[in-house]
Image (spheres, grey):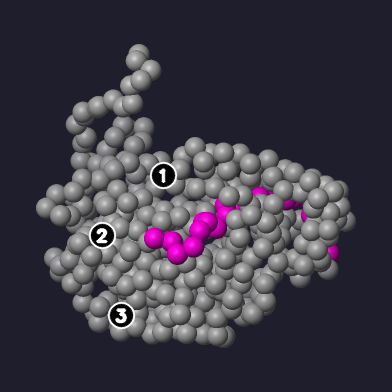
Amino acid sequence: MDKKAQSIEVTKQIPIVGCYDVVVCGGGASGFISAIAAARSGAKTAIVEQYGFLGGMATLGLVTPLSVFTYNHELVIGGIPWEFVERLRRMGGGLVESPLGNVAFDPELYKLLCQQMMLEAGVDMYMHSYLSGCQIRDGKISEVFFENKNGTEAIHGDMYVDCTGDGDLAAMAGVPMQTDEYPPMQPLSTYFILGGVDTDSPLLIDAMHHNKQGENCHCVPVREKLLAMKDSLGIPEFGGPWFCTTLRPGEVAVNMTRTTGNALDNRDFTAAECRLREAVFKVARILKENFEEFRNSYVTTVAVHAGIRESRRIKGLHTVTGDEYMNACKYHDSISRGAHPVDVHIASGSEQRLTFLKKAAYVPYRALIAEGFPNLLVAGRCISADKTAFASLRVQASCMGTGQAAGVAAAQCAKSHVSVQMADTDLLRKSLKNLGAII
């Protein structure tokens, strides 16, 4: 083979294996909620997910707790997301921490409930399927392509919802993205679970329950000791640490590893995950050797996928600004809320910039759509927001809220045969309120 060859050309026939009113790409926090919302709204719905289970960062990334569902003692993310939380709690797989409504969970029961609710709603699931492209016809996305054991397959949708987190479908379709006002992106982190921990100790009883509004829930005593020993022990860069209950005695989920890395670049992300996996076992050993509560601890689980705080965000019809967000600006087309602090993790070092909200913020429908893309909505991390507003909206409860709105809107537009830009937002808001959304 000519070593100078830069590319090859491949032509193949791709079978269209399904036709739907709504196709949701990505089965994480925004995606599985979006698909359920669309199906319950009467749309024939499919979801495309690269793993064999749903839940995204909660289940493959072990990102816990789900935050924030309540603020100032009022529910701010309602409807299907809160139904999910209540059902998870009744299964014994969720613990709702007052007053913030942060939700600790059992990842395996989380997976099971996602699956049950999806099947109840009648959503067709294309699992183990990696989104690889899309076809544009007459200015609209006609089909999406994905790879699985069957080869390359395609499905057709009248409406699409990008819930990939990284805005993959939007990027493939050519949607313009935000130009970041300041670099770099927030760091990646890999969660892990330790067993053999003294979870009845005073230190951890307090630290692993995230139930204090207006306070950072990181474990201050452990943080201070680790910072003092960082150079002498060669402790890798870390944040927090944040500990969270897994609902099992003797276990704690740990959020503290961090590294720079670009999740949109395969080689860079691979290298970053390698560094993070090394860091997991190094910091686990340091906790074991230096803290009585962890003396008998051991790693039971490492997240399948590194947690991604930041990647693409679309340039939508409206970009939620930090000023709007911090002042709880209410829009005529508000469709969801956000209540997590504006939480900016610094890529190098252990610094975190945290700004708490006075009131829960709002998200407009226009942040879910872009000009010139008549059958595409986005939800979750890739909505249209500046870096300040995004630093709050990126968390899972907020993603569930925008996913719910996008699913209902997609079903409504498919039924009415209108573009997403021409959606009846009054009807959308009415439908969301009927589901229990707080908007």
Residue highlighted by disc 2: 376
Residue highlighted by disc 1: 50
Q: Position of residue 124 (x, y in %)?
A: 31, 51
Question: Nearer the N terminus, badge 3 or badge 2?
Answer: 3
Residue highlighted by disc 3: 333
Which quadrant of the view contains residue 368? bottom left
Residue 15 visible, this angle: yes
Amino acid at pointer 1: Gln
Question: Nearer the N terminus, badge 1 or badge 2?
Answer: 1
Residue 286 lies left or right of residue 415; in this view the side is: right
Task: Look at the numbered disc 3 and give the secondary structure of its residue.
Answer: loop
Question: Nearer the N terminus, badge 3 or badge 1?
Answer: 1
Q: Nearer the viewer, residue 348 or 193?
A: 348
Range of magenta residues: 179-201
Label 3 to label 2, Cα distance in Å? 17 Å
Query: In percent of the image, x 57 and y 68: which residue is there?
Result: 343
Query: In percent of the image, x 76 and y 49: which residue is there?
Result: 235
Query: In percent of the image, x 21 and y 69: which residue is there?
Result: 421
Residue 65 lies left or right of residue 426; in this view the side is: right
Label 3 to label 1, Cα distance in Å? 32 Å
Task: Look at the numbered disc 1 and give the secondary structure of its residue.
Answer: loop
Amino acid at pointer 2: Leu
The 10 Å Cα crowd at callout 3, few under 14, some 14 to 19, many 20 or more, is: some
